Amino acid sequence: AQSVTQLDSHVSVSEGTPVLLRCNYSSSYSPSLFWYVQHPNKGLQLLLKYTSAATLVKGINGFEAEFKKSETSFHLTKPSAHMSDAAEYFCVVSATYSSASKIIFGSGTRLSIRP
Amino acid sequence: ETGVTQSPTHLIKTRGQQVTLRCSSQSGHNTVSWYQQALGQGPQFIFQYYREEENGRGNFPPRFSGLQFPNYSSELNVNALELDDSALYLCASSLGDRWDTEAFFGQGTRLTVV
């Protein structure tokens, strides 16, 4: 079985300050983990993914995430927030194969950026 | 833009009716997945098709069904619509039957059931 929990429904930071969006997961398989971003009236876009290679994953737009197996976490970070980062962010867990598994999205974290 | 297009963008249906939503995959992609995103929630996986066969399904009743065509475009059909079916329906295409590949999403179809 798999599940994913995004620990914050809303995060607000000032422009230029660090961003931390938290995600915890559980999986019976070796998981693949993703972060997607959803801007208003736009489709979901992949930020980054972890698929059992390097535990520190770098993505687009300066975002990165670290896979910590001992903590079952995959938190998303960015050193300096930009106004254009305001959006909804989803943490996603899946297995590599198996029709018995599913792709599970978290409930989302809305990121607001204060000027 | 991802190259994944969905139609229509908005739709209003009456409870009990049937609806068909359409998705055109990104060129070269042979896998399509469908998701339901209720307001304020994350997308929920409905099912996935790989080379015209269903290869994964989420916790949705049989009145949610799908098709994938030889050109890899796809349809989502929902019968006996219920008010709770009101949501944004997202289609995503990808390459191959691995679940860890990047999916490219369309902008969705907003379905309202009244």
Image: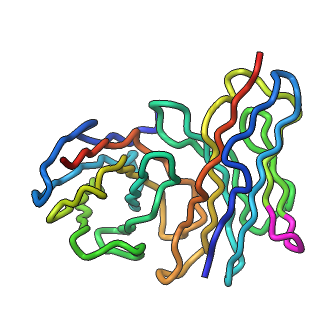
Residue B14 as seen in the image, left or right of residue B6: left
Towards the viewer: A101 or B18: B18
Residue B54 x/y as whole percent: 33, 74
Q: Quadrant of residue A95?
A: bottom right
Q: Quadrant of residue A62?
A: top right
- In this rendering, the answer to whether B36 lies above or below A11 is below
Residue A75 x/y as whole percent: 80, 54
Residue farthest along the top direction in this orientation:
A115
Start-end of magenta stretch: A68-73
Residue at 40%, 46% (x, y): give it: B26
Main secondary structure type of the part rendered in magenta: loop
Towards the viewer: B65 or B1: B65
Residue at 67%, 51% (x, y): give it: A35
Residue at 71%, 21% (x, y): give it: A83
Residue B11 as seen in the image, left or right of residue B84: left
- In this rendering, the answer to whether B27 lies above or below B64 is above
- In this rendering, the answer to whether A52 lies above or below A37 is below
Residue B84 x/y as whole percent: 30, 58
